[in-house]
Amino acid sequence: MTWLLSVISALTGVILTHAVLRRLRPADNSVVQFLALAALGAGLLAWVLTRTATPPVQQLAALALLTFGCELYLFLFTFAISSVSLALLLEKTGRNDASAPVAQAPTPAARVERMLESRLLLRTPAGYALAPAGRVIVRTRQMLRNFFLHET
């Protein structure tokens, strides 16, 4: 069970380091920051597990569990920063009169600005174009959609 404590420690360390890094470098892409930290955490976990003579099956289980934990955190984190529904709820929560109508939903222009800041889109004379990171996301989505046979 030492391997399980190692996983919990690694995941906690990655999340706390990400929280500190977000405060020190808020302009950087938060998802890329987290993925880099998660990769470092996985490498450190693998090193610790091999140094403590953990059986290979438990090493794989530990790395799989860390990966799952990181994916869950990343999902919750990206949901919190990009959800239109959540933005509307937060805007409604900040009002004194909760029955008052919401002034305005988050605009597509604001979403495009965030995609530009995240370097998913590029501004061109003709409008917008996919940046290399945006192409990777689109290709990955298409591959996953085809693999899981999703229509949309």
Image (cartoon, rainbow, N blue to C red):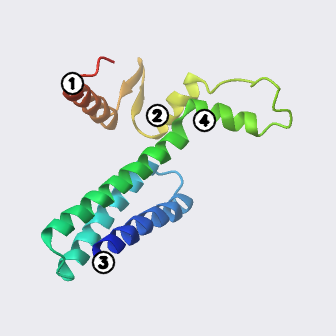
Question: Split into 4 quadrants, where in the image is the N terminus?
Answer: bottom left
Dot 2 falls on a residue whose secondary structure is: helix
Q: What residue is disc 3 on?
A: 2
Q: Which badge, 4 or 3, is on the more N-terminal residue?
A: 3
Q: Residues within 10 Å of mark 2 (few under 14, many from 20)?
A: some
Q: Residue at x 70, y 23 (%)?
A: 104
Dot 4 falls on a residue whose secondary structure is: helix
Q: CA distance from mark 4 to mark 1?
A: 29 Å
Q: CA distance from mark 2 to mark 3?
A: 42 Å
Q: Residues within 10 Å of mark 1 (few under 14, many from 20)?
A: few
| Disc number for residue 115 | 2
Which residue is at the far left? 56
In the picture, residue 37 is in which quadrant? bottom left
Q: Which badge, 4 or 1, is on the more N-terminal residue?
A: 4
Q: Residues within 10 Å of mark 4 (few under 14, many from 20)?
A: few
Amino acid marked by disc 3 = Thr
Front one among 19 and 4: 4
Q: Residue at x 43, y 44 (%)?
A: 75
Image-based side of 93 in relation to 135, left or right: right
Which-is-in-front pick, marks 4 and 2? 4
Which-is-in-front pick, marks 2 and 3? 3
Q: What residue is disc 4 on?
A: 86
